[in-house]
Amino acid sequence: MFAARTIGHRGCAAHAPENTLAALREAAKRGIAWVEIDVCLLRDNTPIIIHDDSVNRTTNGMGLLIDLDWRQVADLDAGSWFNAKFASERIPRLDDALTEVQSLGLGLNLELKIHGAEGERLVEAIMPYLRDSGISRDEILISSFDHAALAALHAEAPGFAIGLLYGEIAPDWRGTAEALDAIAVIGDYRKVNEAAIRDVTADGRDIYVYTPNDPKAVYAQWRWGLDGVISDDPQKFL
Ligand code: G3P
Ligand code: MG
């Protein structure tokens, strides 16, 4: 298994505002070894840690990421929507998140979140941050639903571990995994069946599912060979 059996989704989204440094600290405090976070691109090519294509849901600001520069989002409150006690949380830039992950000793599943046609630009933008962080290749798994972005990453930096994200795992997953040298396949826990788990593991790759929050939901999947879960409430799965 490349990552961990239990990975905190968007940090630890059940207990802290998603994709913030507080969520990373919350995961570490709860004994979680790996976290998943989403990286998106702003208009000025700054990679930031956020899930949606806008800041509307998770901050006190408004606007689409493609219309915003870093100086316009840097001071937004990214915590109060979750709980007033997190009012000091800001949207992390990728370098902030990498620093925090490394200082907490966490493994990182970085999901490239592509909302339009910015896949290659996002890959280009994150590379200097990854190189500067010095993060070790065995501490980071880069995943995406956008397999073209993963192909760009693979071409640019073939040493990074890649995870192929799917809703339902597509019949042609093996060809894509071979082309990208992916070490993992990651699917929606409600759509990943026994055949998929057995096929992926027999192929020598890991299989993870997102986002079960009740351990009972994946009892059978563990028996079939599941490698890990990405959960908002990861401690429940330890
Ligand atoms: O990376 C697994 C999971 O995070 C994918 O879905 O929408 O929560 O980013 P989403
Ligand atoms: Mg994600």
Image (spheres, rainbow, N blue to C red):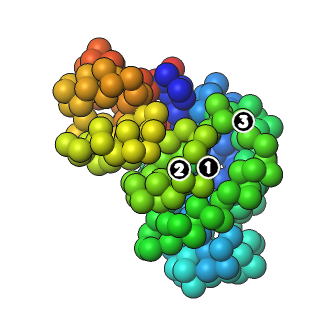
Could you tell me the amino acid type at mark 2?
His
Q: Residue at x 64, y 45 (%)?
A: 23
The label on residue 154 is: 2
The tag earlier along the polypeptide, 3 or 2, is 3
Q: Quadrant of residue 59?
A: bottom right
Relative to 215, is 48 above or below? below
Q: Residue 101: horizontal and vertical position, in percent?
A: 72, 41
| Occupied quadrant, residue 26 | top right
Residue drawn where x is 66% and y is 36% of the image: 137
Tag 3: amino acid = Ser
- Closest to the camera, between mark 1 and mark 3, is 1
Dot 2: what SS?
Answer: helix
Disc 3 CB within 8 Å of nearest ligand 1 atom? no
* Mark 1 in CB contact with mark 2 (< 8 angstroms): yes
Which residue is the site of mark 3?
Answer: 136
User: Which of the marked residues, 1 or 3, is nearer the chain's N terminus?
Assistant: 3
- Which residue, given by chain and number where applicable, does mark 1 sit on? 157
Using the numbered discs, state the Cα–Cα distance from disc 3 to disc 2 in whole angstroms: 16 Å
The vertical placement of 110 against 199, above or below, is below
Between 208 and 64, the one lying in front of the other is 208
Q: CA distance from mark 1 to mark 3?
A: 13 Å
The structure residue drawn at horizontal position 55% and vertical position 80%, both measured from the top left corner, is 66
Q: What kind of residue is marked 1?
A: Ala
The correct choice, above or below, for 135 with respect to 150 in the image is: above
